[in-house]
Amino acid sequence: MKKTETGFTLAEVLLTLTVIGVVAALTIAPLIQSVKEADMRVRWKKAYSVIEQATRKLLVNDVAGSFQNYFTSDVDLRDKYATYLIYTKICNSGVVNGNCWANVKYLDGTSPPQSWFDSASLISPDGSFIQFQMNSSQDCNKTSWWGGLPKCGVILVDVNGLKGPNTFGKDMFGAQKTNRSCG
């Protein structure tokens, strides 16, 4: 009787490992990107919730139901919100870029004027940047370029701070400050 040994050849093992490596390379990168995008959405929802809660507290505790003529400047807007927000650093207008705010891009890769992002800001404990911009007329009935809604100002959030990509729609989002809300 002849004894036969069965097993895999070295070529079969190497071929199997190569196939597994290729499949892993094709699936892991999109999976990681999907997880990063989900993380950015969760961070924005958290930041929006915190800002909305501060807005409600301001409306209940500080004003008679309307923000019209309540805020006088970017700094005033930030400071009044700061009483209801937890933060680790304050940045004043004129020293924000590079200190509290990174170079910003749109999804198409173009950059807005950097002067747009040099307003009073806060840095939250999780590293998010929150920037406060007033409507120059202080008129909460003036229509904005964001959706045609009346706005008193804009609150911008970079959910991961100086970490990239610093792009609107990826890790940067905004909410308009209207007469009675942040929407």
Image (tube, grey):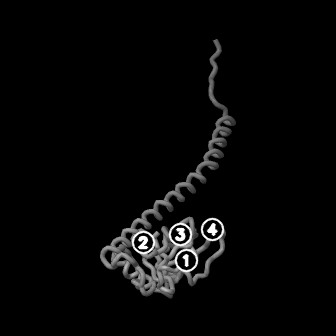
Q: Which mark is residue 172?
A: 3
Q: Residues within 10 Å of mark 1 (few under 14, many from 20)?
A: some
Q: Which residue corresponds to mark 1?
A: 144
Q: Position of residue 78 (x, y in %)?
A: 41, 80
Q: In the structure shown, which secondary structural element does the residue marked by tag 3 occupy?
A: strand
Q: Earlier in the sequence, mark 2 or mark 3?
A: 3
Q: Earlier in the sequence, mark 4 or mark 2?
A: 4
Q: Earlier in the sequence, mark 3 or mark 4?
A: 4
Amino acid type indicated by mark 1: Ser
Amino acid type indicated by mark 4: Leu
Q: Is residue 1 left or right of residue 50?
A: right
Q: Which residue corresponds to mark 4?
A: 107
Q: Which is nearer the eye, 152 or 78?
A: 152
At 42% across and 71% down in the image, what residue appears? 181
At 48% across and 83% down in the image, what residue appears? 139
Q: Is residue 148 left or right of residue 90?
A: right
Q: Residues within 10 Å of mark 4 (few under 14, many from 20)?
A: few
